Amino acid sequence: MPSIDRSKTIPAYIYEAYNTQSKRQKFPPSHFLLVDSSGNRKFPYRDPKSGAIHCGLLRAAMSRAAQYNYNEVEIKARTIYEKSCKEKEKDIEIKKLDIQGEEVFGIVIAPDELDTDGDTFTKEAIRKACYEYNTYFQGTAYRHGLRLNTEQVNLLESYCVPTDLVLEGETVKEGTWVQRWKIKDPELQRQIRDKEIVGFSLGGFIIDNSSRG
């Protein structure tokens, strides 16, 4: 998915800790997915305060590694993500998953609610991300990795709700980003029915023009 306002994607203290190479040199190589031949530390994935794996940084690393053809880094990031964040991903499952035949409708992200990394998103940040997604992307990936093609899925709707809604007795707040997909792939349909796939996950990332990775 597209980039989102930096302060609403990765906590400011993490960005400040890693936004230059000189600052990155203060942290051990184990905080990064790649240390190149010149000693440059790239693709941070651990919280600079606690040293714990940070799922948001891993998502950013997967997106950036794929964009700049760091294939080994992308594989490493995805492997760590699957092991350490896959279960957490279920915590941000869509609030409503309405399955009608091949169609799936649900929430991508709601304003001012904590995600698994402890971050929140304003209505303005969500609207910007939705508009960028609708303009430039309109696709999706399986588990933040494998891109799905139009033979497998089709995006039918993607928008921010203009007012509070009530779905099955639960309020969906104004500004919430929702999507509707047509699921054409039989295996994906099975995984949804069996609750192996339980919702949408926002794959936003930081674009840091000062240093690739």
Image (tube, rainbow, N blue to C red):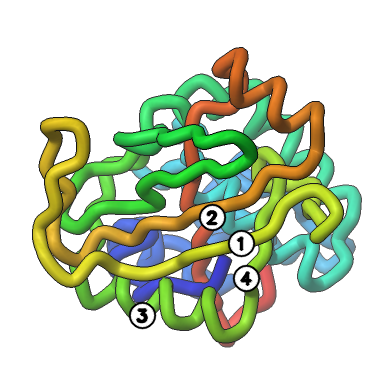
Q: Cα distance, mark 3 to mark 1?
A: 18 Å
User: 180 or 124, which is in the foreground?
Assistant: 180
Rendered view: 76 above or below 182: above
For image coordinates 61% across by 13% down, the residue present is: 194
Residue 128 circle label: 3
Quarter of the image for residue 84 reads top right
Would residue 149 be found to the left or right of residue 112 on screen?
Answer: right
Q: Cα distance, mark 1 to mark 2?
A: 16 Å
Q: Earlier in the sequence, mark 1 or mark 2?
A: 1
Q: Earlier in the sequence, mark 4 or mark 1?
A: 4
Q: Cα distance, mark 4 to mark 1?
A: 7 Å
Residue with the mark numbered 4: 138
Residue 203 circle label: 2
For image coordinates 54% across by 55% down, the residue present is: 203
Q: Earlier in the sequence, mark 3 or mark 1?
A: 3
Please report contact status of discs 1 and 2: CB closer than 8 Å, yes or no: no
Q: Work out whether residue 166 can be spotted.
A: yes
**Disc 4: CA contacts within 10 A as few (<14), some (14-19) or many (>=20):** some
Rendered view: 198 above or below 126: above
Q: Earlier in the sequence, mark 3 or mark 2?
A: 3
Quadrant (top left/top right/bottom left/bottom right) for the N terminus: bottom right
Residue with the mark numbered 1: 155
Rendered view: 165 above or below 47: below
Please report contact status of discs 4 and 1: CB closer than 8 Å, yes or no: yes
